[in-house]
Image (cartoon, rainbow, N blue to C red):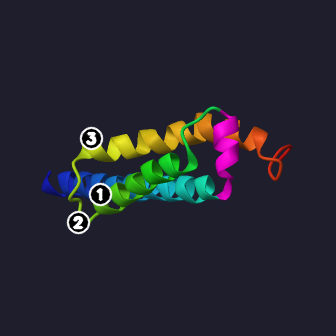
């Protein structure tokens, strides 16, 4: 019986590591992507400024990094806020900015 619980605990640990690394990578990719677009495109799309989004996503990436094991020094709800920021960027902001920036329009 002890072996079965050990296997479950190990599986949960690996799953937690995979999720936290995945969230960190999502936040990092969102930050890199946000840096690619011009500040004018953010204004034309009616979104927060480029500096604002890069600051939010940069903070989210730092939080995501600090949430990864072995440190795990960020509370889970703070990590969730970073994930939400990256998700909002990808699902709303990126789409609007991409449609306006002439370098990326039509891609």
Q: Disc 2, disc 1: CB below 8 Å? A: yes
Residue 46, given in percent of the width and then of the height, sits at 63, 32
In the figure, residue 17 lies in which quadrant? bottom left
Comes first in the chain, label 3 or label 2: 2
Q: Which residue is mark 2?
A: 71
Main SS of the magenta part reads helix
Q: Which residue is mark 1?
A: 67
Residue 14, given in percent of the width and then of the height, sits at 34, 59
Q: Which residues are magenta?
A: 36-45
The verdict on residue 39 being magenta is yes
Name the residue rendered at 44%, 53% in the picture.
Answer: 55
In the figure, residue 62 lies in which quadrant? bottom left
56 displayed left or right of 40: left
Name the residue rendered at 33%, 55% in the picture.
Answer: 63
SS under mark 3: helix
For residue 52, above or below residue 47: below
The verdict on residue 6 being magenta is no
Name the residue rendered at 38%, 54% in the picture.
Answer: 59
Between 91 and 45, the one lying in front of the other is 45
In the figure, residue 7 lies in which quadrant? bottom left
Between 78 and 56, the one lying in front of the other is 56
Distance from the alpha carbon under mark 2 to that under mark 1: 7 Å
Comes first in the chain, label 1 or label 3: 1
Determine crowd level at label 1: few under 14, some 14-19, many 20+ residues with C-alpha closer than 10 A. Answer: many
């Amino acid at each position: 019986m002890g072996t079965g619980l050990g296997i479950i605990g190990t599986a949960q640990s690996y799953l937690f590591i995979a999720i936290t690394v995945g969230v960190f990578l999502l936040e990092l990719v969102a930050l890199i992507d946000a840096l690619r677009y011009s500040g004018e495109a953010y204004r034309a799309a009616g979104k927060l400024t480029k500096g604002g989004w890069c600051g939010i996503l940069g903070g989210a990436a730092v939080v995501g990094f600090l949430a990864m094991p072995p440190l795990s020094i960020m509370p889970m709800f703070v990590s969730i806020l970073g994930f939400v920021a990256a998700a909002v960027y990808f699902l709303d902001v990126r789409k609007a900015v991409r449609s306006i920036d002439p370098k990326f329009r039509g891609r």
